[in-house]
Image: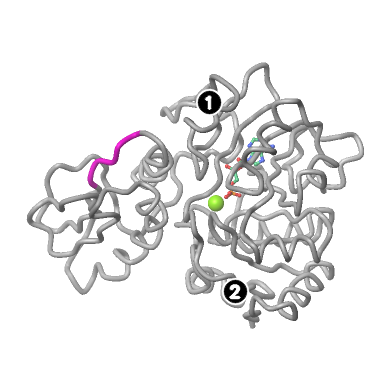
C-alpha cells in the first residue's frame, strides 16, 4: 500500500521519518513530482532505481533545503554561487565536482566524479527537505522513459504499491523538469533545457554551450536518453496538418480536422503550455481508444524561453523507441 500524506506539519514529519528509515517517498516540487530517498543510504537509493525501472548508469539529482547545504557535498565555483543566488530555490540543477567528503552514496551519482544538486522552490518540498535535514536523491516519480508526473494521480498511475508514500503537494507550477547545467568543464554546458530559460542563464553568466540532441551524438550526460517522456501513442512534431486517425496537441489556434484536441495554450503562452504538457500527453493517451486515435500530431512551438524545454521533451517523445 502506498500511503498518501497530507501537506501538513504532521504529514511532512511522517514523510521525513520515512526517508530517515530508508523508505521511498514521492513529493511534489515546482517542476514535477520526485521519487525521494535518503541520498546517503545506498540501499534506499537502489530502491529508487528499482521502483522506476531506471538504468543505474543514469544518475539522480540531489535535493537540498539550501545552497549552503548543497555546497557541502560539491565544490562550488564563483559561477555556481552566482547562479545559486539568482535561481535558487528554483528549477535549476547544477552539476559540480563531488567533494572528497561528499555524503551522497556513489550509487546515487552513478559512480561519477560529479554530482547534480538543486534547491527546489515548492514550499512543501522545502519543508520536507528541512525536516529531513540531509540530501534527498529524487528522479521524477514515473516509470523510466514514461511521461513525468505533475500530480498525485500521475504518480499513483505508475508507482502505486511500489513506494511507501506520496506527500501530496498539489499541482506543479512549472510542470517541466529543471534545467541541468554542467559547471565541471571549462565553460558552462546546458545538458537539459528546463524550467529556467537559457536566455536567463546567459543574461546572468554569459554564453552557455549547448549539448545537441543529435542521433549518434556521444551521450555526455549519462541518461540524456534520446527516447524519453514518451506517451503510449506515437507522436510527431512540427505538424502543419492532422491525419485521419491523429489527435492534435495544439498551441494557439488549432489546425483543422482533429476530432480529439488538447490545447496547451490558446493564447500561446509558453509557461502555461509547459505546465500543461505532461498532463496533455497523459490525457491524449487516455482518450485515444474512445476516439479511434492512433497517434498525436504536435503543433510547432517557438524554440525560445520555455519553448526550448517543451521542444526538447516533444523531440524525445517523438524519437524512435
Ligand atoms: P531526472 O532525475 O529524471 O530528472 O533526470 C536527471 C537528469 O540529470 C538525468 O538526465 C541525468 O543524466 C542528469 N544528471 C544527474 N546527475 C548528473 C551528473 N553527475 N552529470 C551529468 N548529468 C547528470
Ligand atoms: Mg525523469
| Magenta span | 299-303
| Mark 1, other Cα within 10 Å: few <14 / some 14–19 / many ≥20 | few
Q: Quadrant of residue 101?
A: top right
Image coordinates of residue 23 in percent, x first then y, are: 76, 69
Mark 1–mark 2 Cα distance, whole angstroms, equals: 35 Å
Residue annotated with mark 2: 168
- Residue appearing at x 16%, y 51% in the figure: 253
Rate crowding at label 2 as few (under 14), some (14 to 19) or many (20 or more) other CA atoms within 10 Å.
Answer: many
Relative placement, left or right, of 205 versus 317 is: right
Closer to the chain start, of discs 1 and 2, is: 2
Whether label 2 lies within 8 Å of ligand 2 gets the answer no
Depth check, front residue: 35 or 106: 35
Magenta stretch encompasses residue 201: no
Q: Is residue 150 above or below residue 153?
A: above
Pick whichever, 215 or 26, lies toward us. 26
The answer to whether residue 15 is left or right of residue 159 is right
Q: Position of residue 70 (x, y in %)?
A: 78, 44
Is disc 1 placed on a helix, strand or loop?
Answer: helix
Which secondary structure, mark 2? loop
Which residue is at 37% across, 34% downward?
304
Side (left or right) of 10 relative to 152: right
Residue at figure coordinates x 40%, y 53% from the top left: 230
x, y percentage for residue 181? 60, 33
| Count of number-bearing discs | 2
Residue bearing the label numbered 1? 202
Quarter of image, res 141: bottom right
* Picture layout, residue 191 above or below residue 154: above
Q: State the predominant SS element of the stretch in magenta.
A: loop
Ligand 1 location (quadrant): top right
Quadrant location of the N terminus in the rendered image: bottom right
Return the residue nearer the eye: 153 or 120.
Answer: 120
Amino acid at each position: 500500500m502506498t500511503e498518501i500524506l497530507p501537506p501538513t506539519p504532521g504529514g511532512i514529519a511522517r514523510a521525513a521519518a520515512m526517508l530517515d528509515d530508508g523508505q521511498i517517498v514521492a513529493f511534489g516540487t515546482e517542476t514535477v513530482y520526485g521519487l525521494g530517498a535518503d541520498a546517503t543510504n545506498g540501499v534506499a537509493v537502489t530502491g529508487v532505481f528499482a521502483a522506476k525501472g531506471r538504468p543505474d548508469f543514469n544518475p539522480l539529482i540531489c535535493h537540498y533545503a539550501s545552497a549552503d547545504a548543497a555546497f557541502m557535498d560539491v565544490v562550488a565555483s564563483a559561477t555556481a554561487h552566482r547562479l545559486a543566488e539568482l535561481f535558487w530555490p528554483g528549477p535549476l540543477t547544477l552539476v559540480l565536482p563531488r567533494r572528497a567528503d561528499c555524503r551522497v552514496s556513489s550509487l546515487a551519482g552513478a559512480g561519477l566524479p560529479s554530482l547534480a544538486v538543486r534547491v527546489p522552490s515548492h514550499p512543501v518540498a522545502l519543508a520536507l527537505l528541512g525536516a529531513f535535514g540531509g540530501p534527498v536523491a529524487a528522479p521524477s516519480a514515473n516509470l523510466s522513459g514514461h511521461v513525468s508526473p505533475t500530480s498525485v494521480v500521475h504518480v499513483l498511475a505508475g508507482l502505486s504499491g511500489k513506494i511507501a508514500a506520496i506527500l501530496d503537494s498539489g499541482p506543479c507550477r512549472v510542470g517541466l523538469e529543471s534545467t541541468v547545467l554542467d559547471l565541471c568543464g571549462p565553460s558552462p554546458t546546458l545538458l537539459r533545457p528546463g524550467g529556467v530559460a537559457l536566455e536567463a542563464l546567459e543574461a546572468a553568466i554569459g554564453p552557455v554551450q549547448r549539448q545537441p540532441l543529435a542521433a549518434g551524438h556521444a551521450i555526455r550526460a549519462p541518461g540524456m536518453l534520446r527516447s524519453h517522456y514518451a506517451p503510449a501513442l506515437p507522436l510527431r512534431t512540427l505538424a502543419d496538418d492532422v491525419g485521419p486517425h491523429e489527435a492534435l496537441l495544439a498551441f494557439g489556434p488549432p489546425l483543422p480536422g482533429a476530432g480529439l484536441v488538447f490545447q496547451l495554450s490558446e493564447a500561446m503562452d509558453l509557461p502555461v503550455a509547459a505546465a500543461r504538457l505532461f498532463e496533455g500527453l497523459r490525457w491524449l493517451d487516455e482518450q485515444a481508444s474512445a476516439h479511434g486515435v492512433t497517434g498525436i500530431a504536435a503543433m510547432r512551438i517557438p524554440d525560445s524561453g520555455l519553448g526550448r524545454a517543451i521542444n526538447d521533451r516533444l523531440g524525445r517523445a517523438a524519437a524512435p523507441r
